[in-house]
Image (tube, rainbow, N blue to C red):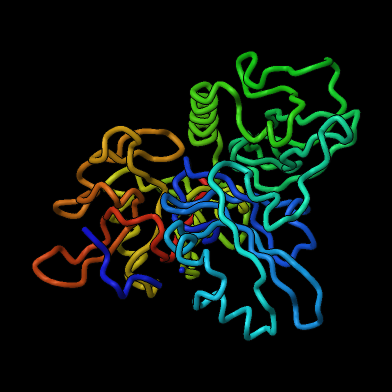
């Protein structure tokens, strides 16, 4: 079912982003695009962009990130009147160039800005998550390595007992590339820019990730308290949850949960959905992002993100999921007859903005 216009309201990455969307650099007010140290994943209909402008004081800067592909084509004329242009004008800035590009990491230069120096003259630029990420591709920070260093990624167990992946720069013991995913885990070194954000054997990575999350769910107990005291513990389901009232896209919400070393809520049974139906009635919202997305091959199938299990049919509102273009799942309250007045699951376009719920499990 399509969400009505009033739903277009606000966790953070990006716009609706498909986990398979292109990766773009995402920074504001940079001296040069190549100086950006943050990457985001764009939405289904977004591309990378570079905007060059001159500030009120006469200094040149760049904003880079994701932009809707249609808006990009409309804004090829820099005089095109958009809300973004207005915001620059309000700040006293003058846009001097806007460019868009398609492909991962393509906006680290643009509008005449210089590229990175040849890699023979420097160390690689690597993803850098020293405190870990649930999966290597969830890391969003970058750093430049020394010439004698390589990018690396390795699994480790955090202080809280979670199975995570650490990444960054180091002097690796082996020369040349050590293929990521070489053995039974995502672990190794590589020598090219941005090479450690994912394993070369993607299917293997997904399998490892699922195993990790299953292990965490079945072995770890939260009975002694939630890792974050702002979360609420539910002993019946051995999970901790937190409701966020900020309205953001699905992908942004997922990434915000990751920052808490958590995941989007996954109420996998009808009993859990019914529990949150009662909780959410007093929370002030009518729709919240949860951790399920449309299967990449079968539009009518949705899967939980940590286990890859199919979402049960009895968790959905009647006639849901309904639309191929609505790829992300929410827990949603229909407040009109004759539909059931319950919080149940509904498919929604990933770029809508709504509240979200994170969980430890």
Q: Where residue 141 appears, x then y in whole percent? A: 71, 48
On screen, residue 342 versus residue 107, left or right, reads left
Q: Residue at position x 52%, y 25% from top?
A: 202
Q: Residue at position x 16%, y 72% from top?
A: 336
On screen, residue 309 above or below 326? above
On screen, residue 38 versus residue 297, left or right, reads right
* Quarter of the image with the N terminus in it: bottom left
On screen, residue 216 above or below 74? above
Q: Where residue 332 appears, x then y in whole percent? A: 29, 62
Q: Residue at position x 51%, y 34% from top?
A: 213
- Residue 225 visible somewhere in the drawing: no
Quadrant hosting residue 163: top right
Q: Where residue 64 appears, x then y in whole percent? A: 64, 59
Q: Foreground residue, 61 or 43?
A: 61
Q: Foreground residue, 120 or 266?
A: 120
Q: Where residue 65 appears, x then y in whole percent? A: 60, 57
Q: Residue at position x 82%, y 35% from top?
A: 118
Q: Foreground residue, 301 or 208?
A: 301
On screen, residue 96 above or below 231? below
Q: Residue furthest left?
A: 338
On screen, residue 20 versus residue 197, left or right, reads left
On screen, residue 148 versus residue 64, left or right, reads right
């Amino acid at each position: 079912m399509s969400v009505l216009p009033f739903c277009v309201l606000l966790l953070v990455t990006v716009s609706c982003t498909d986990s398979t969307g292109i990766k773009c650099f995402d920074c504001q007010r940079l001296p040069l695009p190549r100086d950006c140290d943050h990457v985001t994943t764009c939405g289904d209909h977004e591309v990378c962009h570079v905007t060059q402008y001159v500030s009120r004081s006469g200094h040149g800067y760049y904003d880079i990130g994701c932009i809707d592909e249609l808006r990009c084509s409309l804004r090829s004329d820099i005089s095109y009147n958009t809300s973004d242009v207005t915001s620059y004008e309000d700040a006293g800035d003058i846009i001097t160039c806007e460019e868009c590009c398609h492909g991962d990491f393509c906006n680290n230069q643009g509008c005449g800005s210089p590229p990175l120096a040849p890699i023979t003259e420097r160390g690689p630029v690597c993803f850098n998550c020293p405190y870990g990420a649930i999966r290597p591709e969830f890391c969003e920070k970058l750093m430049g390595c020394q010439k004698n260093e390589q990018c690396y990624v390795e699994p480790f167990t955090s202080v809280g007992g979670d199975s995570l992946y650490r990444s960054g720069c180091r002097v690796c013991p082996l020369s040349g590339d050590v293929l990521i995913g070489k053995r039974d885990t995502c672990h190794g070194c590589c020598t090219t820019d941005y090479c450690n954000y994912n394993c070369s054997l993607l299917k293997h990575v997904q399998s490892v990730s699922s195993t990790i999350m299953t292990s965490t769910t079945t072995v770890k107990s939260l009975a002694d308290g939630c890792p974050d005291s702002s979360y609420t513990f539910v002993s019946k389901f051995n999970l901790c949850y937190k409701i966020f009232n900020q309205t953001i896209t699905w992908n942004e919400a997922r990434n915000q949960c990751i920052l808490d070393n958590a995941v989007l809520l996954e109420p996998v049974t009808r009993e859990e959905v019914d529990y949150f139906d009662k909780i959410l009635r007093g929370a002030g919202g009518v729709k919240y992002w949860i951790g399920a997305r449309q299967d990449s091959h079968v539009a009518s199938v949705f899967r939980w993100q940590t286990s890859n299990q199919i979402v049960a049919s009895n968790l959905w509102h009647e006639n849901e999921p309904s639309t191929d273009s609505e790829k992300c799942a929410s827990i949603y309250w229909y407040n009109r007859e004759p539909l059931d007045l319950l919080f149940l699951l509904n498919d929604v376009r990933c770029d809508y903005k709504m509240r979200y719920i994170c969980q430890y499990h």
